[in-house]
Amino acid sequence: MKLSLEAVAALTGGTILSGDPELNVFGVASLLDATPEEASFLGNEKYFEDFLHTSAGIVLVPPGLPKYPENVAFVEVANPSMAFNALVKYFKASSYKFVPGIHPTAIIDPSAKINPDRVRVGAYTCIGAHCEIGDGTDIGNACQIGDSVTMGENCRLHANVTIRERCKLGSRVTIQPGAVIGSDGFGFLMGDNGRYVGIDQVGIVELGDDVDVGANTTIDRARFGRTVIGEGTKIDNLVQIGHNVVVGKHCIIVALSGIAGSTHVGDYVTIAAQVGIAGHLKIGSKSTLAAQTGVTADIPENAAYWGTPASPFKDACRQFAALRKLPALIKEVHSFKRKLDSSGN
Amino acid sequence: MKLSLEAVAALTGGTILSGDPELNVFGVASLLDATPEEASFLGNEKYFEDFLHTSAGIVLVPPGLPKYPENVAFVEVANPSMAFNALVKYFKASSYKFVPGIHPTAIIDPSAKINPDRVRVGAYTCIGAHCEIGDGTDIGNACQIGDSVTMGENCRLHANVTIRERCKLGSRVTIQPGAVIGSDGFGFLMGDNGRYVGIDQVGIVELGDDVDVGANTTIDRARFGRTVIGEGTKIDNLVQIGHNVVVGKHCIIVALSGIAGSTHVGDYVTIAAQVGIAGHLKIGSKSTLAAQTGVTADIPENAAYWGTPASPFKDACRQFAALRKLPALIKEVHSFKRKLDSSGN
Amino acid sequence: MKLSLEAVAALTGGTILSGDPELNVFGVASLLDATPEEASFLGNEKYFEDFLHTSAGIVLVPPGLPKYPENVAFVEVANPSMAFNALVKYFKASSYKFVPGIHPTAIIDPSAKINPDRVRVGAYTCIGAHCEIGDGTDIGNACQIGDSVTMGENCRLHANVTIRERCKLGSRVTIQPGAVIGSDGFGFLMGDNGRYVGIDQVGIVELGDDVDVGANTTIDRARFGRTVIGEGTKIDNLVQIGHNVVVGKHCIIVALSGIAGSTHVGDYVTIAAQVGIAGHLKIGSKSTLAAQTGVTADIPENAAYWGTPASPFKDACRQFAALRKLPALIKEVHSFKRKLDSSGN
């Protein structure tokens, strides 16, 4: 499998800046790893030094660079990272192909609706009573699917995924290994006898179309009603979503973040890593929460917040900068005090 | 399945404030989702607006509300959230019933003590040598139970739970999917050759009666002796408990928190989400650690703490409030300085 | 199994300070739990009070203690914690023995290279096409190993581990239950239609020799190329390693920490618990990041950092100490202001 410079430009919708249109590459790599027979890309100005020292044959570049290395062919594109993805797809090392069929060790309840000619079910996977699995869906090895779970078409569940009873998945949902959908919400009441009593958690989890769920992420079922992840939302690894949370459409939730019970997150919200959001809050659409933010109050739309407790992003930056000056400030104030005292004020 | 207003009052120990005692409801829902044929509850004043606009047939309310919506029947109860739980149980959508029996694909070592007429073991679950499983215990699909593990009566392990060798579970322990009990403690010593040497972790984990463990939570075995979770303690998803930690009775540990090795936590402690507690500390009984707190020193009894490093809760609130004023304070101090300088002080 | 005081000294390379050389112990325990028939150790001065009240028969001690309890035999060693490990090994309660053999329910693709006389494969484990498994490797129950995975010799995978296609493990790699190696990296681009498009993640994960991976930890495969964990690095439970991260040799990464995509971590770095490191950064060798640190910029070699955003450790300590004084400082400045105003300045 090879690709000429001309073909690279065509595939990425870019313009050849330099190089022989018939120059061929045979794979892709990062700027520092790439050989003259591979293509690479400059997607982030942090890598400009790597770019100047690359041995790649072809590099996808954004417009207007101040300097270029020698002996490299360049294709200019608007978004090198997205354009490079087209090359990655072309050379796709992964041999994943959807091959329908039910592994003989899979245990599927006879009441489940599933077309064995159009669905794949891996080894040691169990599918409960009254499940409905859409065509084109690929369920990996050792997944445990509870009773009355429904999945749309063309979903992909990797190995060791657990989906508890009655949860609903849209179409084209992807779930990485070890994720748990529909675990009991964490709700207890303190009884008069000094012991916690579990609150029954009889609701479900509903994942919209095109939702991605990361490895070992956990999404709790609602106390009653539904915990909802909206269409197109992408969730990273080791994220915790509490019961009755409603996340809107096309959000990003990065690793090790947690959203407590009954909080509503709007659409197009970006939640960076290790963010914590308290329960019963509203997070406005198109807002951004920077990494490690601790949210204890509602967040307006289109806003960026940072810090614990969360402040508007620019305020948080000023606070963090001011904190660095605080030890010196304390000394300065003490020195004033001495001056004022000695001047008799 | 239906319930009259009179029956709702009887079931919840409440008083009818308004409505026809023979009015029937057929299910439960949140204030905004409920129809006239469903019951709901007002458990948190944040939902007072939803309450005023509910279409529910019956609402459980706390005493002394300033205002009520029209055309709704009310039952006054001391604790609407707990009372509602009784209704949820009544209408329980979940069809969970304990049906004893060993799935033919379960692999149970012949030396294990387990009564197949009184225990359920799911598909593809393995139970090691010399295990003892109490009556009424329900072990889901694909659980991996190591040698010499003991469990009391009426435990429930959901799918994909791993319990390593020799760990001990009390009675009525509930474990959500993907949790790991008895992983090796994280202990290494730097050798003279510049390489870490693993310290053998030969102890166990002991979970008391009525302990709950959340999805994908991990509890490490002791270096020697025991890592202990006391009776009645409830642990949320994605929590990490280090080796030789001792957690007391009736504690709450919320998602994404971590407790490092050898720390002792008292009874009735509440540890909110994303809290980190360093090793070898003592956390006093009935103390509360607010979300994202970082604990680096012992915490007294009955205290509330917040922040990193943890301060008494009120102090932390004052510090966070002061931090918001700090950028302005710095300007003010600089302006004094100019005044003082110009005034010749 | 027993050990005399003389034998304890020989085994640990220590010196008998007091006690009958023929005194025997039959096991090990902590200072407070130990009986006169057990050995213990004083590894941390925090336990000095426990030491003074121990009932242990023999205690391993560091040089130069100010005081000793009565009726206890002492062996002085340079590093009591490491020395004690030798005793733990001797009395090792764990009965782990490597017994090669393929469980009849394991499903191993015929193209996999694996010597059934020298490898153990547990029940319900699946090993994909073209895998290569080194001699002495022990794969527990219910592990899911994708196609073309390679492992060196003497690895140990506990139950329920998932390793996706093409990942490479060195020799003597240990993986705790529930860990996921090779999940897809978290990479999306926003399309013109307002929907995220997944970036293909076609690289792999490579774990060096002697790497340990904790329970339910997740390590994402590279976008292309490799996510690398260097030789001898030890990773705790519930850690997230993003795509294309490169971690050097002999690092420690403690629980609930996350490293975002493409960051490079040097050798001998210590990353304490709940640390977050942003993407595309360089963390210098032999640096230390204290717990809950949030790293948003490169970290130099040999440095210790703390706080969010990370400051040099001593600066962070000063900032945290200053923050505690800030509420009082604000009052003081306001009092100056009043004085200055009233004095006509």
Image: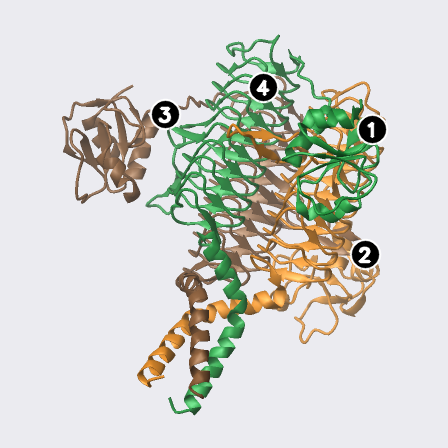
Chain colours: A green, B brown, C orange
Label 4: few (<14), some (14–19) or many (≥20) C-alpha neighbours in 10 Å: many
Q: Amino acid at mark 1?
A: Leu
- Marks 4 and 3 on same chain: no
Mark 4 and 3 residues: CB-CB less than 8 Å, in contact?
no
Badge nearest the viewer, 4 or 1: 1
Q: Amino acid at mark 3?
A: Lys
Q: Which residue is mark 1?
A: A23
Cα separation between marks 3 and 2: 59 Å
Give the image quarter of residue C71: bottom right
Mark 3 and 2 residues: CB-CB less than 8 Å, in contact?
no
Q: Residue at x 36, y 78 (%)?
A: C337
Pick the front one: B224 or A94: A94
Q: Which residue is mark 2?
A: B194
The chain ID associated with circle 4 is: A
Cα separation between marks 2 and 4: 47 Å
Label 2: few (<14), some (14–19) or many (≥20) C-alpha neighbours in 10 Å: few
Q: Amino acid at mark 2?
A: Gly
The chain ID associated with circle 1 is: A
Badge 4 marks a residue whose secondary structure is strand
Q: Which residue is mark 4?
A: A126
With B249 as the anchor, is C63 left or right in this view? right
Task: Please tell me which of labels 4 and 1 falls first in the chain.
Answer: 1
Q: Which residue is mark 3?
A: B92
Cα separation between marks 1 and 3: 68 Å
* Quadrant (top left/top right/bottom left/bottom right) for the C terminus of chain B: bottom left
Q: Amino acid at mark 4?
A: Cys
The chain ID associated with circle 3 is: B
What x and y, as percent, mark residue C253? 67, 50
- Marks 2 and 4 on same chain: no
With B166 as the anchor, is A324 left or right in this view? left
Label 3: few (<14), some (14–19) or many (≥20) C-alpha neighbours in 10 Å: some
Badge 1 marks a residue whose secondary structure is loop
